[in-house]
Image (cartoon, helix red, strand yellow):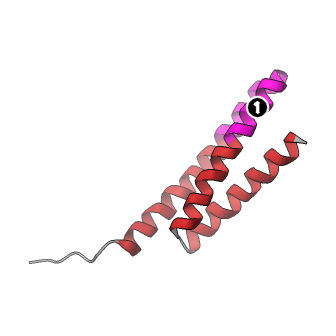
Amino acid sequence: MLLIFHIAIAFLGIIFSGSSLFSPSEKKLKSSYILVAGTFLTGSLLIILKPAHLVQACFSGLVYLGFVGVMIYIAQRKLAKEVAPPQVKY
């Protein structure tokens, strides 16, 4: 049951992070942060409960965190450009 919950959270994290790329908003980014943290926590719990799959889980987790992290970073940069006031040149 925990594995299904973990996969669902990770999948939603990818969806929210991906949607933030196309239309960034503070709400979507906060949701992405929460989903990534939830994925990390449930993944850690799965590793504690089944340590035999440690190497595979860690590799998959790093790939996931890297992929979602890049999407969140790009979305943050886009949102900052939209929210920031225009620069005045003298």
Q: Nearer the viewer, residue 56 or 19?
A: 19
> Compared with residue 77, is residue 49 higher up or lower down, i.e. above or below?
above
Q: Nearer the viewer, residue 32 or 60?
A: 32
Residue 38 falls inside the magenta stretch: no
Rendered-image quadrant of the C terminus: bottom left
Q: Nearer the viewer, residue 70 or 19?
A: 19
Question: Residue at horizontal 62%, vertical 59%?
Answer: 31
Question: Residue at horizontal 66%, vertical 63%?
Answer: 16
> Compared with residue 73, is residue 79 higher up or lower down, i.e. above or below?
below
Residue 45 falls inside the magenta stretch: yes
Question: Residue at horizontal 64%, vertical 64%?
Answer: 18
Residue indicated by mark 1: 45
User: Residue extending furthest left?
Assistant: 90
Compared across the picture, whether 1 is left or right of 43 comes to: right
Q: SS of the residue at dot 1?
A: helix
User: x, y (%) of residue 5?
Assistant: 83, 47
User: x, y (%) of residue 6?
Assistant: 79, 45
Which quadrant would residue 27 be assigned to in this image? bottom right
Which quadrant would residue 51 be assigned to in this image? top right
User: Residue extending furthest right?
Assistant: 1
Rendered-image quadrant of the N terminus: top right
Which quadrant would residue 65 be assigned to in this image? top right
Chain part drawn in magenta: 40-62
Q: Nearer the viewer, residue 57 or 47?
A: 47
- The amino acid beneath tag 1 is Leu
User: x, y (%) of residue 21?
Assistant: 56, 68
User: x, y (%) of residue 33?
Assistant: 58, 52
Q: Which secondary structure is most common in the magenta stretch?
A: helix
